[in-house]
Amino acid sequence: MALPRALRAAGGRWARCLSSSAGVGGDTIFALSSAPGRCGVAVIRASGPGSRGALQTLTGTPKLPPPRVLALRRIRDPDTAETLDRGLVVWFPGPRSFTGEDCAELHVHGGPAVVSGVLRALGRLPGLRPADPGEFTLRAFRRGKLDLTAAEGLGDLIRAETEAQRRQALRQMEGELGQLYQRWSDTLTQALAHLEAYIDFSEDDNVEEEVLSRVDGAVRALEREIGAHLRDGRRGELLRGGVRAVIAGPPNVGKSSLLNLLCQRPAAIVSPVAGTTRDVVEVALDIGGYPLVLSDTAGLRETTDLVEREGVARARDRLCQADLVLAVLDASAVPPEPAGLGAALGALQPPPGTPCVLVLNKADLLRGDGGPLRHGCAQRPPLPPTTLLSCKTGEGLEQLLELLARELARLCGDPLCGSPSLTQSRHSRHLGGCAAALARFGRERPRDLALAAEQLRLARRELGRITGHVGAEDVLDIIFRDFCVGK
Ligand SMILES: Nc1nc2c(ncn2[C@@H]2O[C@H](COP(=O)(O)OP(=O)(O)OP(=O)(O)O)[C@@H](O)[C@H]2O)c(=O)[nH]1
Ligand SMILES: [K+]
Ligand SMILES: [Mg+2]
């Protein structure tokens, strides 16, 4: 089915999504799949019914290499037959390809002129057009090659910047999260089948009461499992997006010095003037494989200076959004006993319930051997994990990094252990909907079996929306928007 010209001309991805869902045998897309710019080898790929012809035309021979085997070929301009490059080509006949369609890949020398020459040649072939961001993966999804959670995992894998992020994304891309949700969906399908059988046949006495208690048991167990998955403290989401840590403390204790020490560059201004920092300064860090988004903020104090007051308001605002607080105090100015330290920390009013690490900076200024602060008086509950540091000498940096890595591992969990984590708010929204429907099932079940069954259908629908088996159209644009071209 051809789309109206106007819709196509709008150029929106929607026009194209619609066209690709409108029927198999649509257009063929191509793109540079490796990163743009000069490189050793660039990979250009095509997907769609025109891939075969494109490969034949560009290699100047009807003879295709054997499927999925690299072959060295001259790559020619289709109009002039001029050699553009000599490179490796691969032919992936559908359905055994990434997208499920016929696909071709050209591995050429990664010079900008070679790449643009080949892309221009492909663009001149009838039925071929440049791909939109994520369009290869979108086609793979439409052909059932992967579910939405796997597509999201793939997007995360490409964006992963730390080891732990990569591990989590890879697990999700390989389908573990999707399989978990599919298993829950299967449980619901089975419960629903039993319930429907009971509704239809119970009067014939062929179906026993016991069926009902089995359905109840299965639904209750599922409710518990989903509840636990939802209560994981946002571990997967934290790992995916980075833990937001906020450095907070009184003026001049060395907050900006701490930020600079951790990111190893002078990102924030340091000066002996109290009230130097006003704007929030943010850096992204990799601590022990975990992603940390660290913010330096204005020193917290009452002030009449209008600009500083705005800085303090911004600091408070950031603190409220923190996943982790790095409270900084001047070690040479705090009472060296737990109650006094606790009071100094309390004066900062960290948001209740947010995990906190206490950094006692300027350890180099402690007199003698540092007394009780150096000998662990601070390591006692109810104080949070506490560490001595000197931004000036670097003393205590190792311990601080270890402490941070431990906190991050606790917050994000081990991405390789246990069941896969919830990684997106989209998932938790639908799981919340699913859990709510299961709770309603519990209430309806003794009253009205038909209404109870309807709740199971609703619960299953919510799971289907996560994996994309139900009503995916309205989220596709959001999910694939962040993909790169060529993936
Ligand atoms: N002796 C010593 N001085 C330090 C240490 N860390 C920071 N300083 C000094 O303390 C002063 C304040 O440091 P900053 O990093 O600007 O402190 P801040 O907490 O960001 O200050 P505001 O932004 O004004 O709230 C500067 O003169 C630093 O050189 C340390 O570990 N030891
Ligand atoms: K300062
Ligand atoms: Mg500062």
Image (cartoon, rainbow, N blue to C red):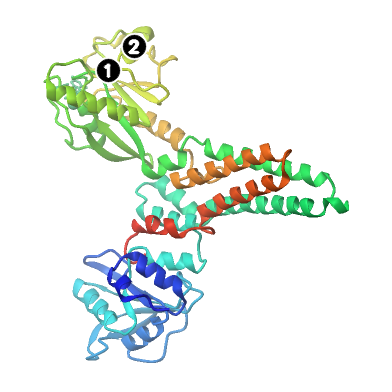
- Residue 341: which numbered mark, if any? 2
Tell which residue pokes out farthest to the right in this image: 205
- Quarter of the image where ligand 3 sits: top left
| Other-residue count near label 2 (Cα within 10 Å), few / some / many at <14 / 14–19 / ≥20 | many
Q: In the image, residue 450 lies at what x, y percent?
A: 70, 48
Q: In the image, residue 243 lies at what x, y percent?
A: 37, 37
What residue is at 85 percent from the left and 48 percent from the top? 208
| Other-residue count near label 1 (Cα within 10 Å), few / some / many at <14 / 14–19 / ≥20 | many
Q: In the image, residue 197 lies at what x, y percent?
A: 77, 54
Amino acid at circle 1: Leu
- Residue 354: which numbered mark, if any? none
- Residue 329: which numbered mark, if any? 1
Amino acid at circle 2: Leu
Quarter assignment of residue 486: bottom left
Distance from Cα at disc 1 to Cα at disc 2: 9 Å
Q: Where is the N terminus found, in terms of image quarters?
A: bottom left
Q: Where is the C terminus found, in terms of image quarters?
A: bottom left
Residue 129 in view (yes/no): yes
Give above or below for 190 relative to 414: below
| Secondary structure category for the residue under label 1 | strand
Quarter assignment of residue 485: bottom left
Q: Is residue 313 left or right of residue 127?
A: left
What residue is at 24 percent from the left and 91 percent from the top? 81
Q: Is residue 418 left or right of residue 97?
A: right
- Nearest the camera: 312 or 401? 312
Quarter assignment of residue 412: top left
